Image: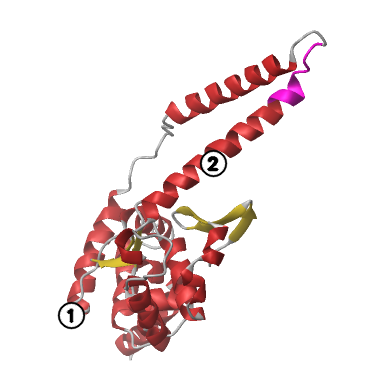
């Protein structure tokens, strides 16, 4: 589920951070497209990482966007096609291109740079307000000089903050996470003949780490085998990746427990 937060322009939060949804989209030609195309486009914006890459299969993207596969395919064709009426003439108005494992948002870097500039201006504005609350100018101080001093100090703080690279302490990596994801990739490609699985380490490693606090690696592998082989209708419409494994873990545990109970009954008979 994606959460929408409104502050000046719209900020769309996602699992990887956030993508700014500029209000200029309302004047864009994309807003003239049909509803499924607009929804798929906004879903891609929400899924994109810092490099503008949205990783998913067509069924997986359709599931995230809550549209049918056919609607998703039409939307992708529209977004990859030239748009002669687009305000942006880069890439002939195309919005995305297909890559291995998903799609690349073609103008992502330009809008990310615009976002950084907006954040900097907002930061300076807030710092100026804070400084004015703490410091009252004396009656014999020139007002222009005072404003210049406030702005200079705020800019200096902003530059210092921008130059500092946070280095939070990190716990030692759990080797079981890498082992499971490496195993899952191989198992996926064996069970899903002809398919290639691209491990999204930044997103999937934390999911596996959380699952391993409850289940042993061996049991988690049994869950994965059920996921990759089940004919369940809902799962069949997804990419059957690690994200779906985490989302359906309780359902998978019920199936595994039922199978184990049957095996125990046969052994004791």
Residues 120 and 84: in front is 84
Q: Judge whether residue 189 can be spotted in this image.
A: yes
Residue positioned 61% across, 23% down in the render: 151
Instruction: Say which of marks 1 and 2 sits in front.
Output: 2
Q: Where is residue 68 in the image (x, y as percent from the top left)?
A: 43, 85
Check the image and report above or below for 247 versus 171. below
Res. 23 image quadrant:
bottom right
Query: Which element carries disc 2, helix, strand or loop?
Result: helix
Q: How crowded is mark 1: few (under 14 residues within 10 Å), some or many (20 or more)?
A: few
Q: Which residue lies furthest to the top in this view?
A: 140
On whether residue 56 falls in the magenta region, the answer is no
In terms of sequence position, does the residue under pointer 1 or pointer 2 come before the other? 2
Q: Which corner quadrant of the image does residue 71 belong to?
A: bottom left
Q: Does the magenta stretch include residue 135?
A: yes
Tell me where residue 142 appears, x and y as whole percent: 74, 12
Residue under pointer 1: 193
Horizontal and vertical percent position of residue 183: 22, 63
126 above or below 208? above
Q: Mark 2 points at which residue?
A: 119
Compared to 199, does 230 lie above or below?
below
Horizontal and vertical percent for residue 140?
80, 8
Q: Is mark 1 on a helix, strand or loop?
A: loop
Magenta residues (range): 131-138
Residue 238 visible in rendering: no
Residue at left 60%, top 32%?
124
């Amino acid at each position: 589920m994606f959460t929408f937060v409104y502050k000046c322009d719209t900020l769309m939060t996602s699992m990887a951070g956030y993508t700014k949804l500029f209000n200029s989209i309302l004047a864009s030609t994309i807003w003239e497209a049909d509803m499924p195309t607009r929804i798929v486009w906004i879903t891609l914006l929400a899924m994109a990482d810092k490099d503008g890459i949205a990783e998913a299969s067509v069924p997986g993207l359709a599931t995230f966007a809550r549209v049918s596969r056919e609607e998703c395919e039409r939307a992708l064709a529209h977004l990859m096609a030239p748009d002669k009426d687009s305000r942006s003439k880069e890439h002939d108005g195309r919005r995305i291109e297909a890559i291995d494992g998903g799609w690349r948002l073609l103008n992502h870097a330009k809008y990310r740079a615009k976002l950084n500039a907006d954040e900097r201006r907002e930061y300076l504005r807030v710092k100026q307000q804070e400084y004015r609350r703490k410091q009252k100018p004396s009656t014999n101080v020139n007002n222009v000089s005072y404003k210049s001093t406030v702005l200079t100090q705020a800019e200096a703080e902003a530059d210092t903050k921008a130059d500092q690279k946070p280095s939070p302490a990190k716990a030692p990596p759990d080797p079981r996470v890498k082992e499971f994801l490496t195993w899952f990739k191989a198992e996926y490609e064996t069970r899903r003949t002809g398919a290639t699985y691209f491990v999204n380490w930044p997103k999937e490693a934390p999911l596996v780490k959380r699952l391993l606090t409850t289940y042993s690696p061996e049991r988690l592998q049994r869950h994965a085998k059920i996921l990759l082989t089940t004919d369940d209708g809902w799962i069949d419409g997804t990419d059957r990746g690690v994200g779906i494994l985490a989302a359906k873990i309780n359902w998978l545990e019920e199936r595994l427990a039922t199978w184990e109970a049957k095996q125990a009954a046969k052994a004791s008979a």
